[in-house]
Amino acid sequence: MDGNINSQEENKDSRPIILLVDDEPIILRGLKEQLKLAFGKDYDIEIAEDAEAAWEILEEYVEKGIDIPVVVCDQVMPGVKGDELLIRIHNKKPDIRKIMLTGQASADAVGNALNHANLYRYLSKPWDSNDLILTIREALKSYFSDLSLVELNRKLETTLLYNRETVVPISKV
């Protein structure tokens, strides 16, 4: 694989993104195909072979205002490790659901991601396809439920402020 970023077609830029990060191209391709079958109707799947490429994708889509509800990341990669990337992602976009998919993560690395990146789930390689799909489906549901709650709370605050300003106490009538 020549580049580290696999960009989608320009006309699909408004769909939410599921970001996959792994330094093994064969695993990335397999994951991408599996997730395209399960989620490709509603989500674009982006892949990155290292933390820096993943960060570039994240920055690009955040700048465009496009949701990245889920990141699935390997732990053991050259350079920046998965837990470090997930912490960095959490610091920028804490609402993203972060899933570690790895066969070689130490307890310290998983603990680091749990404690500092709010890791949504840890899955072992080789993964069970049904478990992976279910985990991502639940992560997506959680992400969008939280977004809906934030929006409903914003509307409620606006309504309360409006009502405070427009309601006239009975004693003043």
Image (spheres, grey):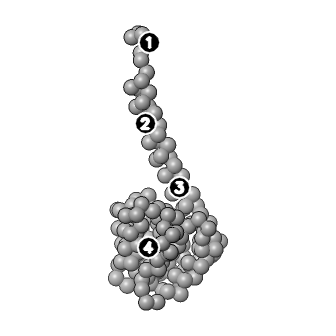
The amino acid beneath tag 2 is Thr
- Disc 1 residue type (three-letter): Ile
Label 3 neighbour load within 10 Å: few <14, some 14-19, many 20+ = some
Looking at the rendered structure, the secondary structure element under dot 2 is helix
At x 50%, y 46%, the residue is 149
Q: Residue at the spot x=44%, y=27% of the render?
A: 163
Residue 107 numbered mark, or none: 4
Q: Which structural element holds mark 1?
A: helix
The residue indicated by pointer 3 is 144
Who comes first in sequence, dot 1 or dot 3? 3
The residue under label 4 is which amino acid type? Ala
- Disc 1/disc 4 C-alpha distance (Å): 64 Å
Q: Are marks 2 and 3 in contact (CB under 8 Å)?
A: no
For the C terminus, which image quadrant? top left
- Dot 3 amino acid type: Phe
> On the image, numbered disc 2 is attached to which residue?
158
Q: Mark 2 and mark 3: span between their CA atoms? A: 21 Å
- Identify the residue under disc 1: 170
Which label's residue is closer to the chain start, 4 or 2?
A: 4
Q: Earlier in the sequence, mark 3 or mark 4?
A: 4
